Amino acid sequence: MRPSTLVLALLAGLALAFVFIFGHFSWSTATDAERLAANRALVEHYGLTDLALFTEARYTRHPSQADLHSAFQDHPAALEHFPTGSLVAPRSLPLFRDAPLAGKTTSPD
Amino acid sequence: MRPWLEKQLHLIDFTLASLARRKTKNVGLLLAYTLIVFVLASLSLFTHALRSEASYVLAGSPEVILQRMVAGRHDLIPPGYLDKIGRIRGVQKKEGRLWGYYYDPVVNANYTFMARPASEVADGTIMVGSALARERGLAPNNTISFRSYAGKLFGFTVAAVLSPDSELLAADLVLLSENDFRRFFEYPEGHYTDIALSVANPQEVRTVAAKLSTALPDSRPILREEVLRTYQSLFDWREGIVLTVLAGAILAFAILAWEKASGLSAEERREIGILKAIGWETSDVIRMKVWEGLIISLTAFLLGGIAAYVHVFHFGAAVFAPVLKGWSVLYPRFTLVPAVDGLQIATLFFFTVVPYTAAVLVPIWRAAITDPDAVMRA
Amino acid sequence: MIELANIRKAFNQGRHNEYWALHGIDLSVEAGKVTAFRGPSGSGKTTLLTIVGCLSRPTEGRVRFKGEDISGLPERFLTDIRRQSFGFVFQQFNLIKGLSALDNIILPGMPTGRPRRDLVERADELLDQLKLGHRSRAKVEWLSGGEQQRVAIARALINDPQVIIADEPTANLDTALSKEFLAILEGFTDNGKTVLLTSHDPLVVESSAVHRVVGMRDGRLTAD
């Protein structure tokens, strides 16, 4: 077989595999949907707020719940003490500063 | 049409023969290129899938979590706090939660202890996450002891192990009864860690949060939308390690392209001269080189992309595991549900195939337009 | 067939190392004959051949090929003419290393879009005629000088050109191979092809295969 036809055939094959593999996700299986639904139900049941991905430290385990101090607990400059701390962005604030809250809270945010 | 097709096949034949002449170098190039695409595509796929799953799954978390702050630090909810909330319209349910962290010196791991109603977990028993169970070798009906921070030893029987499918959420959970929790942590009676509130109407959530802050000035409400947004910015490209990986990959790629673009060897220049002398036009030479660039970059992209997909969705992004694990001992075993962002893949395609093909053409341009006359004098 | 009128060629024109290789050449080349150009190094023989064969353009003057003025044509058309009507055999052979003899031979045919099958068939034919059929798949760098030259000749013939231009064709050959080459030359003209060649070699210049000898010196024609 001519080298050019061989290579073109290989490329075509790869392209087909690529499209198939990536396209196949859109028909996610019933088990996937079940699994997701089960996990969501688990979250609702136990009132969970975070993924259990980074169990290194408090502020990495529950980044959405951590206060400003947890990161600095160990050391004033400890912010990236834990590697995964550099993967998680700080808890983001609500879209707009709640005007009704201004001046009324005494806690830092 | 036919002659055009034949001509392209001829050009591809020649370019393949050209590449085959420096087989080791070109195979190495292809591998390096594929590796870069693999890393970038894996990162992209993993991030997107994790974010998708997080936002779907965490949509079930409580609408508002109320924490109490003292001197800027998170403090316990004292007795009576719940009543101070009173009846705020829109709040369907309010519930004091008890949870905390436990450091297990046996395996140097951190666990999350959560108290559950007696109907779920009886005194003296616990339910554990499957990663924890794996780490400590636990199965239902096994016993395990934890030494509390006060130094006392507590024994528990494992009533159940949570499903392995839930590892991403519950890898390190230890669920125990309220009594056991309070005894273990010597948690003061009537105090809670925080309060979870459910609000029926999603539009009302911020209003409720505002009312809570008014009613309880030392509280800090955390809304579900903030939780979700935290996970939307997971692995953001501006975050430390991701930025490093990206920068590294882009730099490697730039070096590759630069090496290609920085000129032809004398041998290559001579060859182009010969081709021109025996009847190849400038456009033929350029077209041949475009094929070279396309074949290599397309192969690398397709191979790298397919490998990345398999890596992320069948092997749980094993290459990134050490980074994600960091210093933690427990790491959840999970396979993400495939979710692909077409735009990211298209961007990756555009930024890997086009620059490389262009880089291949740059040095050719000058050589391709020179007079073939020079060949006679070589 | 080929007419040259007042051809002048300069290199590095306008720069400090400007050099005029040809100083007004008027020449008429007859079809179907072998014309040899003889002269010392630097006399401009190779330059003249490149202009005749559309490999470069004259600085001044006109080239007419089969009655048509080709000196002012754009590159695309010039290349087309070169590909269809001229076959070159270079002094250094200029074969592409790493490719087989066969692959080298079919190179000029590739841009024409002729099917590979046809090209390979024709190449095999030529190799057989040149008694090189058994080495068609060998890489050219492993061939002897004489074999390489025959591959170069076959490459020049793949598109069946009317004019064959050879620059010092016997420079790298021994006497026996030179004589073989001259026999091949005769075969060309028997098929109605026109041949132009340059040579120092008296064996070639004085051979009966050559119909006309043109002398050159310092960029000008000398008496025949």
Image (spheres, coloured by chain):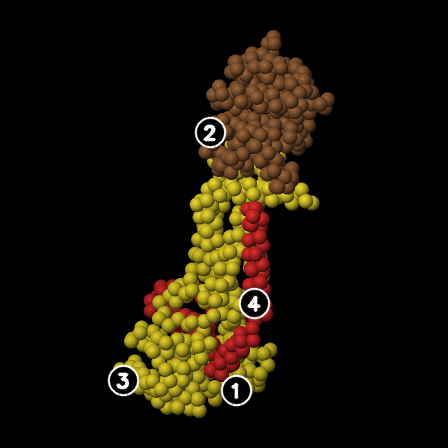
Chain colours: A red, B yellow, C brown
- Please indicate whether residue B153 sits to the left or right of residue B164 in the image: left
Judging by the rendered image, the residue that carries numbered circle 3 is B152
- Near mark 4 (Cα within 10 A), the count class, few <14, some 14-19 or many ≥20, is few
Judge depth for marks 1 and 4 and give the one in front.
4
Q: Secondary structure at mark 3?
A: loop
Element class at badge 2:
loop
Which percent across, then down, holds residue C174? 47, 21
Q: Residue at x 47, y 41 (%)?
A: B21
Residue B93, numbered label: 1
Viewer-nearest of discs 3 and 4: 4
Mark 3–mark 2 Cα distance, whole angstroms, equals 92 Å
Residues at marks 2 and 4 on the same chain: no
Image vertical order of residue C69 relative to residue B216, above or below: above
Q: Residue furthest left?
A: B151
Q: Amino acid at mark 4?
A: Phe
Marks 2 and 1 in Cβ contact (< 8 Å): no
Q: Nearer the viewer, mark 1 or mark 3?
A: 3
Circle 3 crowding by C-alpha within 10 Å: few under 14, some 14–19, many from 20: few
Q: Who's the residue at 57% across and 21% down the image?
A: C183
- Spatial CA distance of label 2 from label 4 is 60 Å
Q: Report which residue position mark 2 lands on.
A: C144
Q: Residue at x 59, y 34 (%)?
A: C125
Badges 3 and 2, same chain? no
User: Mark 4 highlights which residue?
Assistant: A25
Type of the residue with mark 1:
Lys
- Dots 1, 4 in contact, CB < 8 A: no
Query: Same subunit under labels 2 and 1?
Result: no
Q: CA distance from mark 2 to mark 1?
A: 95 Å
